[in-house]
Structure formats: C-alpha cells, structure tokens
C-alpha cells in the first residue's frame, strides 16, 4: 500500500494518491491531472476512484477530466447531487481498493455533503483519515461558504452539524490514526490552520481548539463563527463549476496558449473586454508596463489574488508573463476557474517595448526617502494595503489602512488629487494595489519599496503597538 500527499503551496491544497495492488484512488485532485496519470503509469496501476470530499470552493477539482481519461468512478458522500455521472456513496460504505478498503464517513458541517475517507489496511487496521475541509491541522472548516450557494444553509446550522460530525464521527476514532487534511496554512477555507500538513488524530484531540472534549455546543458555535472574514468572490462560482461541470483542461490550455504579437495583443486588448494581467515580479513591473495592465505576480499568492480581485471567473484575460512561464500562468488560472484566457504576449514585455509601443511606469521610492520627507515637515499620506488584522497588530502611526482584499472600499477612501505613498508587508500587494487603481485613473500613488518590513528595519518611523480593532473596513 502506498499513500502520497501531493501538496500545492500556492493554494495550500493537499491531494492524495493511494495505491494498493495495482488499484489507485485519487482524493480531491487539482484541475490539471497529468501528474496523477503519470504516477499511476509509473506504478503500473489503474485509477479506480476519484474521491471528492465535498464540492470545493477554493479551486476547481480535476475529477471530471480524470474520470474521462481513465474510466475511474467519481465518488461523493451522501446528499451530493452533481450534474454529471458520479456515484453517491452511503455513510459507512466500504470501497474496496486492491488489498485495502476505504470507509465513507459522512461529516456534514463545512458543507452538507462533506465526507471523510478512512483508510483500512490489508490487516483491517484503520490507519489514516482524509478529512477534506472537515478537520484541518489546528483548525476546522469554516461553515459559512455553502450559504453563498444555498441561502437557507446558514452558518449557524452548518456549525451545529460540524459539532456533531466531529464529536460523533471523528473524535471516537483511534489516536494513532494519521490525519490528512485538504488544506494547510494560507487557505481561506479556515481561520488559523497550522503550517504542518499531517498529524496524529490523538495530538489534534489535545491541541485543536475545536476538538476540546469539554466544549459545549454553544461554545463551539461561538468560537467557530468568531473572526470569519468574507470569502473571496470566486468561491461560489467554483462551487457551481464543481457541481455542474466545466470545460476540459485541455480545451482551456489550448485557448490560453495563443502567442500574440505586440500588434495582435494590442488589438485584442482594445477590441475585447479582456483584462490584461502582468504576472512579472513587482520590481520589474514598476519599471515599465503596458498601460492599464494589472500586476499580480506569479511568484506570490497568484491564484487567490486573481480570485479576490477579478469578480467574474468568465472574465476574458490577456497575459504577460516571463518567457517560458506562460503555461504555468494559464494552468494556475484554470485551477481557480478562470478559463477564458485568450492569449499571451509573445516575447513578453520586452517584445512590447522593442515594438515601440506605449509604456507606463510606477514611481517606487525607498523608506529613507519617505522618512526624509516626514523629517522635513512635508505632509506624507501613507496608505497601508495589508489586511486589517495585520494593520491592527502593528502599523505606522498616521498610516491609513486601505486593504487590498477590499479594494473597492479602499478606493473610496482615496482622494484622486492627493499624492499617496503605498506599502504592504514586503512589496507584492502594494504594486497590485497601485496598478489596479492606476488602471482606474488614480495617478498619484507611489510605491514604498520593501514594505512594512523595510519600514520597521529602518527604525525611522513611529510604529504602533497592538490596537484593539473597533470597526471592519
């Protein structure tokens, strides 16, 4: 028997490969399925099941493509009603896989169809549990996502279901069972997940706040619902894609991997409603970019920021990428349902510049320059684009919090006639913030290179201690 976790850092997502005696089960696969096919071929095995723990919100699963390419059976837990051919298993059902079995454990709470899969080895021993978004390391799944798809599923109802699922289905299991969750730190599907991606269930019973044995139902619901922030706007759209189906990843890649000359790229940008996303590093973007393009660097939390800032997954996109990374960009967009990339700039930004086409820049200054202006008595309007929780924890005294993740609200706070200096934690989000607003006609925004880290390290700014948050932006 082989169990392998396939972890994708940019989505903080864990998929799983289980093989026994030539038969394979894949749990919660990503959209691109080539790696799973390659693993099975290498093992001389056949993919028998694609097991889905629930209808995912933060990514588009590869279940449909994987089933189509292998003949594998897509399996959901009880109550799931997909719009494509799939098997709805019953609670407690055993799925045979080679010499082992996988037990279906219905655990509603994160969503109503949420299901865990318990692996039982060839000797009948329960060895590990694949918990999806029901149980994370250090946390549990947030119960407010399903209500964005089904209105009468309130977060309070789901939280109560989750309390019962954890206590009646998960906590009675043996302490030596290995927990394999669907996500780790950085995912928006929970509040405070650990950076660790596996643990023993016994340790989680001791350390995970949601598994405290003396916790009342009322305490659980209150603690679970406290501190939830609005989910990214693309989440409900991904849920519907996972329920209803989607274009094959092959179709999406073919559509997106169209090289466009500078002239053709310019024509496509002008003749369609396509959003131009430049995926280069922020430090390169500020030195020169195509007017009205938005910088979301591929080396940061690319997919989640696209999903946060681009409200419609059907938005047509044009891509600027570093040479050789075009396929990676289109793949990572498809993972979160942005399937309508219609091409990329052949030769990258350098080709655009060599063609003599219009170029814009963003002024970027060091923290020393900002400090000198303040010391000289100049008025410096400082915008902090970090999340409110980061700002509340520590910020420059006098800085105004304008979080990138609430860009439209933040934009309303800005006077177009004033000059602002914008920083985030390290420089990634501030350039996204400035480029997105510059495309909307805000021309007086200057980037503070190095962000809050450079500000603190300089020792030239008055920084607040923790302040108790009073309002939400």
Image (tube, helix red, strand yellow):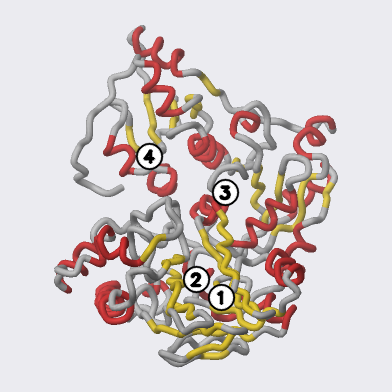
What's the CA distance linking mark 3 and mark 1? 21 Å
Q: Which residue is mark 3?
A: 302
Image coordinates of residue 173 in percent, x first then y, are 33, 77
Q: Would you say the residues marked 4 and 1 are in contact, meaning their CB atoms lie under 8 Å apart?
A: no
Q: Earlier in the sequence, mark 3 or mark 1?
A: 1
Q: Nearer the viewer, residue 344 or 211?
A: 211
What's the CA distance linking mark 2 and mark 3? 18 Å
Q: Which residue is mark 4?
A: 402
The numbered disc on residue 56 is 2
Q: Would you say the residues marked 1 and 2 are in contact, meaning their CB atoms lie under 8 Å apart?
A: yes
Q: Residue at x 69, y 73 (%)?
A: 247
Q: Nearer the viewer, residue 78 or 433?
A: 78
Q: Residue at x 52, y 60 (%)?
A: 13
User: Could you say which quadrant of the image residue 34 lies in?
Assistant: bottom right
Image coordinates of residue 361 in percent, x first then y, are 63, 28
Residue 415 to residue 32: above or below: above
Residue 377 to residue 287: above or below: above
Structural crowding at the residue carrying mark 3, measured as other residues with C-alpha within 10 Å and reported as few (<14), some (14–19) or many (≥20): some
Q: Nearer the viewer, mark 2 or mark 4?
A: 2
Q: Residue furthest top?
A: 376
What's the CA distance linking mark 4 and mark 3? 20 Å
User: Could you say which quadrant of the image residue 199 lies in?
Assistant: bottom left
Q: Which residue is mark 1?
A: 242
Q: Earlier in the sequence, mark 4 or mark 1?
A: 1
- Left or right of 349? Residue 434 is left
**Mark 4 residue element:** loop
Image coordinates of residue 188 in percent, x first then y, are 42, 58
Q: Nearer the viewer, residue 96 or 7?
A: 96
Q: Earlier in the sequence, mark 2 or mark 3?
A: 2
Q: Nearer the viewer, mark 4 or mark 3?
A: 3
């Amino acid at each position: 028997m082989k169990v392998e976790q396939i972890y994708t850092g940019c989505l903080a997502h864990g998929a799983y490969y289980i093989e026994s005696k030539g038969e394979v089960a894949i749990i919660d696969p990503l959209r691109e399925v080539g790696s799973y096919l390659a693993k099975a071929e290498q093992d001389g095995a056949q993919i028998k099941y694609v097991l889905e723990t629930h209808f995912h919100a933060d990514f588009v699963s590869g279940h449909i493509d994987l089933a189509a390419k292998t003949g594998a059976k897509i399996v959901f837990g009880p109550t799931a009603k997909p719009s494509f051919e799939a098997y709805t298993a019953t609670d407690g059902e055993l799925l045979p896989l080679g010499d082992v079995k996988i037990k279906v454990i219905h655990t509603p709470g994160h969503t109503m169809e949420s299901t865990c899969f318990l692996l039982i080895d060839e000797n009948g021993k329960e060895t590990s549990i694949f918990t999806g978004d029901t149980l994370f390391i250090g946390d549990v799944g947030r119960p407010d996502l399903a209500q964005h798809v089904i209105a009468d599923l309130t977060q309070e109802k789901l939280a109560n279901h989750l309390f019962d699922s954890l206590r009646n289905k998960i906590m009675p299991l043996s302490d030596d069972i290995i927990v394999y969750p669907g996500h780790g730190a950085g995912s928006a599907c929970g509040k405070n997940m650990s950076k660790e991606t596996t643990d023993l269930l016994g340790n989680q019973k001791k350390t995970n706040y949601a598994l405290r044995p003396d916790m009342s139902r009322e305490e659980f619901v209150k603690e679970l619902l406290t501190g939830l922030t609005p989910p990214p706007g693309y989440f409900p759209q991904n849920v519907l894609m996972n329920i209803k189906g989607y274009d094959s990843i092959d179709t999406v890649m073919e559509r997106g991997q169209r090289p466009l000359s500078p002239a053709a790229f310019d024509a496509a940008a002008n003749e369609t409603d396509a959003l131009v996303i430049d995926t280069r590093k922020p430090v390169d973007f500020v030195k020169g970019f195509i007017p009205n393009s938005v910088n979301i660097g591929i080396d940061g939390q690319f997919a989640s920021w696209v999903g946060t800032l681009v409200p419609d997954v059907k938005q047509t996109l044009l891509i600027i990428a570093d040479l050789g990374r075009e396929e990676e960009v289109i793949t990572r967009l498809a993972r979160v349902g942005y399937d309508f990339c219609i091409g990329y700039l052949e030769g990258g930004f350098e080709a655009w510049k060599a063609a003599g086409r219009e170029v814009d820049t963003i002024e970027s200054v060091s923290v020393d320059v900002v400090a000198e202006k303040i010391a000289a008595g100049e008025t410096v309007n400082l915008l902090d684009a970090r999340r409110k929780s980061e700002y509340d924890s520590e910020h420059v005294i006098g800085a105004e919090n304008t979080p990138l993740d609430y860009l439209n609200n933040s934009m309303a706070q800005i006077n177009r006639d004033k000059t602002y200096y914008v920083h985030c934690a390290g420089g990634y989000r501030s350039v996204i913030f400035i480029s997105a607003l510059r495309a909307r006609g805000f021309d007086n925004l200057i980037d503070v290179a190095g962000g809050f880290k450079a500000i603190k390290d300089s020792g030239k700014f008055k920084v607040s201690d923790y302040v108790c948050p009073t309002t939400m932006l």
